Image (spheres, rainbow, N blue to C red):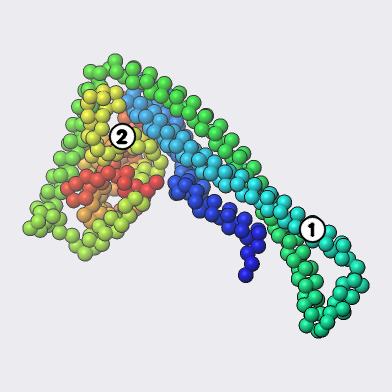
Amino acid sequence: MRISIIDKVLISIILLIIFLPSDVYAQTKEDLESQKSQVEKDIEYTNTLLDKTKSEKQTSIKELELINKNIKQRNKLINNINYEIRMLNSEIKTATDSIDMLKILIENLQEEYAKMIIGTWNNRNTYKRLSYIFDSDNLSQAFKRMTFFKSYSDKRKEFYNEIVAATEELEKKQISYANNKKKKEGLVAKESQEKRKLESDKEEQNKLVQGLSKKEKELKKKIQQQQAELNKLTKEIEKIIAAEVKERGGADNRLRLTPEEQLLSTNFAGNKGKLPWPTERGVVSRPFGEQAHPVLKSIKINNPGINIVTEEKSYARCVFDGEVITIKQITQYNVVIVRHGEYLSVYSNLGEVFVTVGQKVKSKDLLGIIGKDPAEGTTEIHFEIWKGSTTQDPELWLAR
């Protein structure tokens, strides 16, 4: 079977796409657009919280943490835009190569078609064609001559159809090329805009650090106070776990679970990365684990959970089905602890509590109102996840 010229060119175009650098197509345009949209929403919400924090009387660590978060998010957005620009550059290069090849194809087809038209014109006399057929020595030769004329006519139609198809393909590629060029121009402008905003964020960050550095004594006292509160909370949770293990633990010092609790445990574990946030909207201001203090870099702080800044009067909500096992006041705020089989979820810094000990709760049930820190001017929930007697990084469990 003969492969047409247009088929050969289209095969070449496909090969161009296949052998593009693999990293360019590691993510789809839809993925990138979705991620970009989410990061832009995160930045917008962080800025909303920042504006409210700035309206308070004095500069605070929370303001700096939100600025730091904004810088991280903006860097992520710039990387996302840059990735999309690289993808568009590859698509533009492919479209350019395809356009050049299609132009050559159309030119060749038009030349061949022109020759056929001239040949048809020169042999347009029907009498001559009929004479050529009737002058055949035998019926077989006459049939072959008739077949030749039909084949010639079919060939001419085929060339015409290939010219039409190639022209239509060329128009599509030119439209795609123009659209991608326009989109790239928009992304380049967006990238420049975000880089300017990033520089502005960094300038604000430096000012905040300089201002807060003058309050070293006050900051150290605040760090000690916060760490003491976290240590107290950790010890309280460890006491609860130890008491439960003592009451219904096995020889391996692990909590013996009922079949229902085991099922709940399995379901909780199966939802890792899919759990709803403990507040409807929020920004992680302080992540899990050991980290340098945002101002006093020589001081390391250890966070057994994550801190989420949200809007005033926001609700704390349960992340999964379970049972409330503890409600306790630590310093001026309340802590609610929910058991999910082998797992615990901890909700700290609640002003008002809606649930009671022993109450069964469902995913997204409201547990209470998150308290506002009058000194910092922010509303923030401290959230932890435990598996047995070990803390987990909550960000790995929550959906994005």
Q: Which residue is mark 1?
A: 115
Does residue 252 sit above or below 92 in this rendering?
A: below
Task: Please give the name of the residue rendered at 56% of the width and 55% of the height, measured from the top-left corner.
Answer: 14
Q: Residues within 10 Å of mark 1 (few under 14, many from 20)?
A: few
Please say whether residue 354 is visible from this viewpoint: no
Does residue 2 sit above or below 278 in this rendering?
A: below
Choose between 388 and 1: the one closer to the eye: 1
Disc 2 secondary structure class: strand
Left or right position of 62 against 241: right
Q: Percent from the top left, x then y, of residue 277?
A: 36, 45
What quarter of the picture does the N terminus occupy?
A: bottom right
Left or right position of 204 against 114: left
Task: Please give the name of the residue rendered at 26% of the width and 29% of the height, measured from the top-left corner.
Answer: 292
- Residue 205: name its quadrant: top left
Residue 286, label in figure: 2
Please state which amino acid type lies under the numbered disc 1: Lys
Q: Percent from the top left, x then y, of residue 394?
A: 29, 44
